[in-house]
Image (cartoon, rainbow, N blue to C red):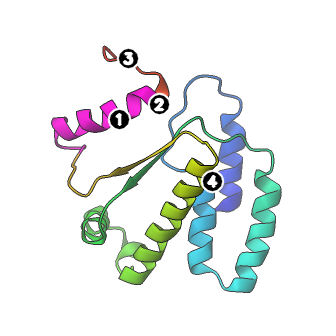
């Protein structure tokens, strides 16, 4: 996954217009930290650091979060076979690590926003979509009439 994501980031460097992505390569490190043994994670981290040392950070990073029960419902709706047995502790550890990464980016002055989507359904509810759009537009230089 790491090498695949790295290649995707290299390919994106050739594009000079706005790009929206539903992941960042750091996501791989968060998942690796929660699935690999300590010695495997150490090796992974060394390779990760080499591959990502010259990658440009996104202009804006948006973290969508939700309570555990909502996450479990959304995972179940995706109905991916490899996600059927995800344990609560695993999801809680991912939430913890994502939130820690968010806090570190914010402390470093990066343009980040965390949106709690527990009570939002921006795919089906126009009001929820507009709420998120209003939060994000100032970060991306959007205008109200777009």
Q: In this view, does 26 lie above or below 12?
A: below
Q: Comparing marks 4 and 2, which lies closer to the viewer? A: 2
Give me the C-alpha separation between circle 3 and circle 4.
29 Å
Q: Comparing marks 3 and 4, which lies closer to the viewer? A: 3
Q: Give the range drawn in magenta.
A: 122-138
Q: Which residue is drawn at 61% across and 42% down?
A: 109
User: Where residue 10 appears, x then y in whole percent?
Assistant: 72, 41
The answer to which quarter of the image holds residue 131 is: top left
Circle 3/circle 4 CB separation < 8 Å: no
Q: What element carries label 4?
A: loop
Name the residue that disc number 3 marks. 143
Number of labelled discs? 4
Circle 4/circle 2 CB separation < 8 Å: no
Q: Which of marks 1 and 3 is nearer the N terminus?
A: 1
Name the residue that disc number 1 marks. 135
Between 17 and 140, the one nearer to me in the picture: 140
Q: Residue at x 31, y 61 (%)?
A: 66
Circle 2/circle 1 CB separation < 8 Å: yes
- Asked whether residue 111 appears in the rendered view, the answer is yes
Name the residue that disc number 4 marks. 25
Instruction: Tell me: 48 left or right of 133.
Output: right
In what quadrant of the picture does the N terminus appear? bottom right
Q: Is residue 146 above or below residue 82?
A: above
Between 11 and 52, the one nearer to me in the picture: 52
- Asked whether residue 24 appears in the rendered view, the answer is no
């Amino acid at each position: 996954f790491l090498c695949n994501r790295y290649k995707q980031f290299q390919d994106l460097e050739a594009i000079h217009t706005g790009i929206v992505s539903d992941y960042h390569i750091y996501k791989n490190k968060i998942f690796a930290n929660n699935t690999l043994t300590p010695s495997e994670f150490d090796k992974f981290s060394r390779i990760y650091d080499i591959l990502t040392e010259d990658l440009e950070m996104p202009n804006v990073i948006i973290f969508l979060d939700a309570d555990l029960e909502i996450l479990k419902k959304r995972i179940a709706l995706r109905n991916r076979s490899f996600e059927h047995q995800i344990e609560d502790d695993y999801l809680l550890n991912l939430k913890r690590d994502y939130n820690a990464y968010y806090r570190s980016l914010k402390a470093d002055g990066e343009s980040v926003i965390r949106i709690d989507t527990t009570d939002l359904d921006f795919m089906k509810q126009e009001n929820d979509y507009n709420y998120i759009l209003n939060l994000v537009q100032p970060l991306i230089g959007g205008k109200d009439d777009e």
